[in-house]
Amino acid sequence: MKVLQICLKPPLPEIDGGCKAINNITQGLLQNNIEVKVLTLSTFKHPFKKEAYNHEYISQTNIESAYINTRVKLIPAFLNLFSSNSYNIERFYSKEFEELIVKTIQQNKFDVILLESLYVSKYLNAIKKNTTAKIIYRAHNIESEIWERNASQEQGIKKSYLNILVKRLRLYERNIINQFDGIAAITEKDKNNLKQMGCEVPIVVIPFGINIDDYIINNDSQKNSIFHIGSMDWKPNQNGIKWFLDNVWGKVAEKLPSIEFNLAGKDMPGWLINHQQDGVNVIGEVQSATDFINQNSIMVIPLFVASGMRIKIVEGMALGKLVIATSIAAEGITYEDKKNIVIANTKEEFVAAIINYSTNIEDQKRIAKKGRELIESNYDNQLIVNNLAEFFKQLN
């Protein structure tokens, strides 16, 4: 079997969850002796860096890229208001990338073309005109749901503008889903949402998976501390952390004055870098996310806008950490509250959970251990990719 994987962003370096989700599928397919060719967009936020790829990866995938400027431009954004097109989608269309895709499928015979995210679906018509391969949409999220939740957090003109974007994006999403030969949703919830949107093509749940052997628990330098790690250029992460600092941390620090909150992530905004609060350490980007997670004890994910799966939660659980998260953040994970994760949706619940599990270490360890077991049994990457490969075979 030969697969063409078309990506919104370069798989490497794995600077965020989306990159990891893409790369894990690539690696899993290769391990299944499936040929993979990778084409990716390159942007100012996610540039293609050839030096990030070793010789073996380049040899196996023959990865190629095309640059596109996806920055929001005032005049095109304004003019878009007078059309019916989704500006969210239009920003990711590149004639150069389309030509690269067409050239690639004309020069090779693929069995499956896998589109990683809704934002590369703009190339679907050009693909269909040039191949008989089965075209699969890997739905990392319900994109209109994320934007709808974003809009709900805003006010005034910005809220009105975002609601326009939501309406157009939802319409685009509904109109495109039945133009694929199959859909690989990342969560059961997303699968159900796609069906409610009118999806009639075959659809399967292919969650984010990890190679569990890569996640070695090392608590030698662990402190009894609270931590968060994530891409801090993503607005929902910023908003969640601001809410946490404003509403939760002060009350925790009053009860537990010696405990620390360690915050790591790339592209830390200036207001966070300069933030001053007792017990809060804003570290910024770390060389090894695994080492950082191992050095701390309780992961908090105060996220109120999301869709799909939060990969950092999977990684935190894999490294044996107790995770306290909102129900929105934990969507897509087959958890049991207070068995393998702790759900908190209000400031009172976050404060109570942090104080409880910071002082009751045995309960903390018990839930953390069950979290690791959940990841081992449900989110092993090879098992997940085997299911995806089987889905490919069923469609061919």
Image (cartoon, grey):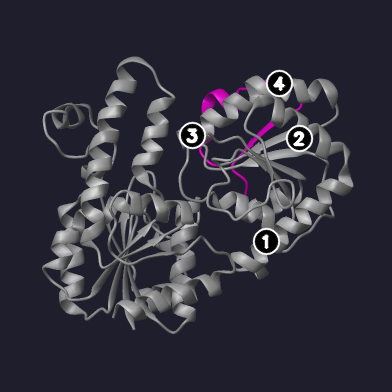
At x 77%, y 25%, the residue is 252
**Foreground mark, 1 or 4?**
1
Query: Which mark, residue 236?
Result: 3
Q: Is residue 57 above or below residue 199?
A: below
Q: Dot 1 corresponds to which residue? A: 374
Percent x, y for residue 173?
27, 48
- Amino acid type assigned to the residue bearing label 2 in the image: Ala
Q: Secondary structure at mark 1?
A: helix
Percent x, y for residue 243?
59, 25
**Foreground mark, 3 or 4?**
3
Percent x, y for residue 207?
50, 61
For marks 2 and 1, the one nearer the N-term is 2
Work out whether residue 92 or residue 154 is closer to the camera in this orientation and state it: 154
Stretch in magenta: 266-287
**Foreground mark, 3 or 2?**
2
- Amino acid type assigned to the residue bearing label 1 in the image: Leu
Q: Is residue 174 above or below residue 31?
A: above
For marks 1 and 4, the one nearer the N-term is 4
Quadrant housing the C terminus: bottom left
Q: CA distance from mark 1 to mark 3?
A: 26 Å
Q: Dot 4 corresponds to which residue? A: 277
CB-based contact (under 8 Å), mark 3 and mark 2: no
Q: Is residue 110 above or below residue 320?
A: below
For marks 3 and 2, the one nearer the N-term is 3
For marks 2 and 4, the one nearer the N-term is 4
Query: Which mark, residue 221?
Result: none
| Residue 280 on the magenta segment | yes
Q: Dot 2 corresponds to which residue? A: 353
- Amino acid type assigned to the residue bearing label 4 in the image: Gln
Q: Secondary structure at mark 2?
A: helix
Residue 326: image quadrant is top right
